[in-house]
Amino acid sequence: MSPEYALEGLFSTKSDVFSFGVLLLEILSGKKNTGFYQTDSLNLLGYAWDLWKDSRGQELMDPGLEETLPTHILLRYINVGLLCVQESADDRPTMSDVVSMLGNESVRLPSPKQPAFSNLRSGVEPHISQNRPQICSLNGVTLSVMEAR
């Protein structure tokens, strides 16, 4: 789910780009985004980012893809995936740009910034004031009683 939808309820065409980026990284790694506890990263996006910034992106590859996907193509796809999951919707490419990036190796790719939701373990988000009260919701149970007429 894109950050703008998760945090503000706003949906745009770039929300689909975000979801596509998550899916692309899941396919390349063979791992789910959630429940990712292999490293210090909270999720697959954080893990992929850590590998990318350390120039170890090839370590993300699902072993089942090793024989069919050359390393330079894998790194290109990871770059595209990370571009798709940028925190700001303005920083994400359009889907037509994504298709062009995936299908044409001569298209130059920009460097991605740190993706959304990759550093949530810190406990406090920098843009949230400490003095502002938190709004919490409780999961309640709804009981439906069926009565015959």
Image (cartoon, rainbow, N blue to C red):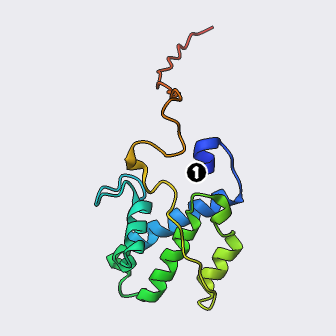
Residue occupying the point 64% across, 87% down: 107
- Tell me where residue 126 appears, x and y as whole percent: 50, 46
SS under mark 1: helix
Drawn side of residue 145 relative to residue 89, left or right: left
Drawn side of residue 8 relative to residue 125, left or right: right
Residue furthest bottom as drawn: 106
- Tell me where residue 60 appears, x and y as whole percent: 37, 73
Residue occupying the point 47% across, 22% down: 140
Residue furthest left as drawn: 38
Q: Closer to the camera, 49 or 72?
A: 49
Can you say which quadrant of the picture contains the C terminus? top right
Q: Quadrant of residue 68?
A: bottom left
- Tell me where residue 95 appears, x and y as whole percent: 68, 70
Drawn side of residue 84 relative to residue 95, left or right: left
Vertical placement of 17 versus 109: above or below?
above
Q: Closer to the camera, 42 or 24?
A: 42
Vertical placement of 92 versus 73: above or below?
above
- Tell me where residue 109 appears, x and y as whole percent: 59, 81
| Crowding at mark 1 (Cα within 10 Å: few <14, some 14-19, many 20+) | some
Q: Quadrant of residue 44?
A: bottom left
Vertical placement of 100 versus 127: above or below?
below
The number of numbered badges drawn on the structure is 1
Residue occupying the point 48% across, 53% down: 117
- Which residue is disc 1 drawn over? 3
Drawn side of residue 91 relative to residue 119, left or right: right
Residue occupying the point 48% across, 45% down: 125
The amino acid pointed to by label 1 is Pro
